[in-house]
Image: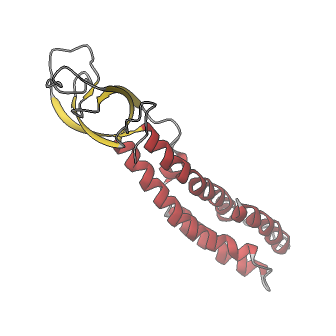
Amino acid sequence: MGEVTDVGVTLPDRITVLTCIACGAMGRQERCDGACSEHKLVLVAAADYDALLAAALTARERAAVMAAVARRFADGGAEDARDAWLDAQEAARRALHELPPEVLESDWTAPGTVTGWWCARCGNVDLPQPCLGVCVWRPADWVSLALYERELRRAEPVIRSARNLSGLLARMAATTPRAGQWQRNWDALRRQAHVALEG
């Protein structure tokens, strides 16, 4: 359900608007019969919203795989710390290899936005821009900033968990203890695994 304005109008969550690919103007020439009900609408490109949803899904899936690797350390000691370390290290490398970097590296908190005026009567969104003299109109999909922010609040814990686990797995993948230090390093990483799994 969309955001409700102070005058009781429910703004749309997702909308398709004619957009000029040259100047970025949005809207259409047809207007209401003189009684437009205009409401401010802050929009995010639907492609950015869809990318956030995909990143959250990928982060959830990959976090489950990385958590299984981290539990090898967290769940207990090992009879042969060297063999256990090398097995977990290889699993960590595989898990990291399958994690798309953009999931963890993208800044999902600052999407590009545009502000238009939406008519509750006819559904038009108006965002005039200085014309460049070459108008090429295409339909473009947008979502409200409120919807994007709701999904971001749901996605942030999942993405944060994937980041924490990937940091732990990166240390596992890149570190090989010196001779005689296998058990000591196993115990140290075990403590770090507990922290990553709880975060």
Q: Is residue 159 above or below residue 66?
A: above
Q: Quadrant of residue 183?
A: bottom right
Name the residue at 81% across, 68% down.
185
Give left or right: position of 29 versus 45: left
Give left or right: position of 48 versus 99: left
**Colouring method of the image:** secondary structure
Name the residue at 64% across, 59% down.
170
Spot occupied by residue 69 in the image (x, y as percentages of width and height): 63, 72
Q: How many marks?
A: 0
Spot occupied by residue 105 in the image (x, y as percentages of width and height): 54, 46
Give left or right: position of 92 versus 62: right
Return the residue nearer the eye: 149 or 1: 1
Return the residue nearer the eye: 30 or 150: 30
Give left or right: position of 169 versus 56: right
Return the residue nearer the eye: 183 or 27: 27
Spot occupied by residue 159 in the image (x, y as percentages of width and height): 57, 54
Spot occupied by residue 118 in the image (x, y as percentages of width and height): 30, 29
Q: Is residue 193 above or below residue 143?
A: below
Q: Quadrant of residue 126?
A: top left
Name the residue at 78% across, 84% down.
80
Residue located farthest toward the bottom when viewing the structure as drawn:
79
Q: Quadrant of the C terminus?
A: bottom right
